[in-house]
């Protein structure tokens, strides 16, 4: 391509009325992890799951009125929501105000006291004493981002440090052959208001970089990471939402209940079953044959492109269960005007052979915007260079705008699996 286009405390469990759940072992104030399973079921559990994390895993809520002494763990609702289709036993260890840094450091601790006065254990102790587990749900990072206010490091450095600590917790599970589920760092009032008024750009950038790193790592380690779940899509923060506490940081009891339903639905394919009318937002991927018995339906990655803004220049490429050599594109772009669309243009004939009038158009709608998606196309083998452009929907090729930066590229190999390329428009 010529240079011109390359432009640049007492524990009170919130009991869901639809079905009671029992804790084991029975105790007025047992140390975590707490165990949940359907009370009326005598069947052996189909799967054993560990939910490990911070206050959002604990279900810490009603802080303003009750001093933060009530807990509605989403894991309890997961058990209840799945009970009609599959029996699972789920252990919850949620340590209020704990950071990923602390939990990574204290992974072998037999006693971790949290902000609410409750006692839990390190991730390695939970795995050794209460395992084996089929899956571990890990939700960390919120408190680390809040604590980063005292850190003058660049936002990417902060995000990388938090990511490294979260990864250490996951890898402790992988060492015991326990596949993990990444629950991304959710939105918060601070994040959403900062997006609107631009007053806290470092926090926003750290949030974005952290979640993008988690997504990329999950795509690169599908044999160990069973699922990336986009918490921001499932639980978007909104003023006066019944799912959020007034502090804009914690889920309400109703929010944890709803979040548990969302997690349960995402886990169903991993457990060998699937509901009709499944929620949108989960993207299926091919599975390593060695996991075919435990994951008959394949591993999943939650589609997060409409919420998660990927780092500029950092493309995420994942295998998909389409025909070999087929490639499809998902782009996050807010820069279009009414009557415009996003196109992929590149060296391959299917991408227009660098002719704007023949570039491949992506589609969007009110529900998924600013996510744009393409159909799957079969590209030629070898290295394919491409870029994104914005142009009129109808008068194609006229008045196009090129994204900044160098040409992007993808290598298409003979007999390679189909791929999905996730991108962010570069301004």
Image: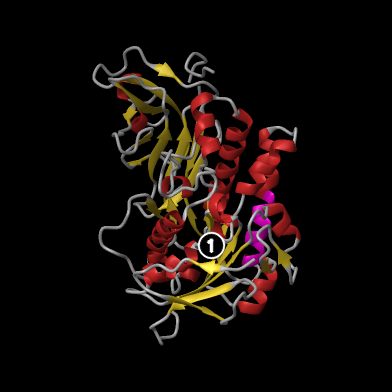
**Residue 422 in sight:** yes
* 312 horizontally vs 145: left or right: left
- Image position, residue 329 (x, y; %): 39, 38
- Image position, residue 152 (x, y; %): 75, 32
The residue positioned 57% from the left and 73% from the top of the image is 34
Nearest to the observer: residue 17 or residue 313: 17
359 relative to 293, above or below: above
Magenta residue span: 164-173
* 100 horizontally vs 213: left or right: right
Nearest to the observer: residue 222 or residue 27: 27
- Image position, residue 228 (x, y; %): 49, 54
Q: Is residue 1 magenta?
A: no
Secondary structure mostly seen in magenta is helix
211 relative to 369, above or below: below
The residue positioned 43% from the left and 71% from the top of the image is 79
Q: Is residue 166 magenta?
A: yes
- Image position, residue 322 (x, y; %): 35, 52
Q: Which residue is mark 1?
A: 71
Category of crowding for the residue at label 1, using alpha-carbon neighbours closer than 10 angstroms: few (below 14), some (14–19), many (at least 20) = many
């Amino acid at each position: 391509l010529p240079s011109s286009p390359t432009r640049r405390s007492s524990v009170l469990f919130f009991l869901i009325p639809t079905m009671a759940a029992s804790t084991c072992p029975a105790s007025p104030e047992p140390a975590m992890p707490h165990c949940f399973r359907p009370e009326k079921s005598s069947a052996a559990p189909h799967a054993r799951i560990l939910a490990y994390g911070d206050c959002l895993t604990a279900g810490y809520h009603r802080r303003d009125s009750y001093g933060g002494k009530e807990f509605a763990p989403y894991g309890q609702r997961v058990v209840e929501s799945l009970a009609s289709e599959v029996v699972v036993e789920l252990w919850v260890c949620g340590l209020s105000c704990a950071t990923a840094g602390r939990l990574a450091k204290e992974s072998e601790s037999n006693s971790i006291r949290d902000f609410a006065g409750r006692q839990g254990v390190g991730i390695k102790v939970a795995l050794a004493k209460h395992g084996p587990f089929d899956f571990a749900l890990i939700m960390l990072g919120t408190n680390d981002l809040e604590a980063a206010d005292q850190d003058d490091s660049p936002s990417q450095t902060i995000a990388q440090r938090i990511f490294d600590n979260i990864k250490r917790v996951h890898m402790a599970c992988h060492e015991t052959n326990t596949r993990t589920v990444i629950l991304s760092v959710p939105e918060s009032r601070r994040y959403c208001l900062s997006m609107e008024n631009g007053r806290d750009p470092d926090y926003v950038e750290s949030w974005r970089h952290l979640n993008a790193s988690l997504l990329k790592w999950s795509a690169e380690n599908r044999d160990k990471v069973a699922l990336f779940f986009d918490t921001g899509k499932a639980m978007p923060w909104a003023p006066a939402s019944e799912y959020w506490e007034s502090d804009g940081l914690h889920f309400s009891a109703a929010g944890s209940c709803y979040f548990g339903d969302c997690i349960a639905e995402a886990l169903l394919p991993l457990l060998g079953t699937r509901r009709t009318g499944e929620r949108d937002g989960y993207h299926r991927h091919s599975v390593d044959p060695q996991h075919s018995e435990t994951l008959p339906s394949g591993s999943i990655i939650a589609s997060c492109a409409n919420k998660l803004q990927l780092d500029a220049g950092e493309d995420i490429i994942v295998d998909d269960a389409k025909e070999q050599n087929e490639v499809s594109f998902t782009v996050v772009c807010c820069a279009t005007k009414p009557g415009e669309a996003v196109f992929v243009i590149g060296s391959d004939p299917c991408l227009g052979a660098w002719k704007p009038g023949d570039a491949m158009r992506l589609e969007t709608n009110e529900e998924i915007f600013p996510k744009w998606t393409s159909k799957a196309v079969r590209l030629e083998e070898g290295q394919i260079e491409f870029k994104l452009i914005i142009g009129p929907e109808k008068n194609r090729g006229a008045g196009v705008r090129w994204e900044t930066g160098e040409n992007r590229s993808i290598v298409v190999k003979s007999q390679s699996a189909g791929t999905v390329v996730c991108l962010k428009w570069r301004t």
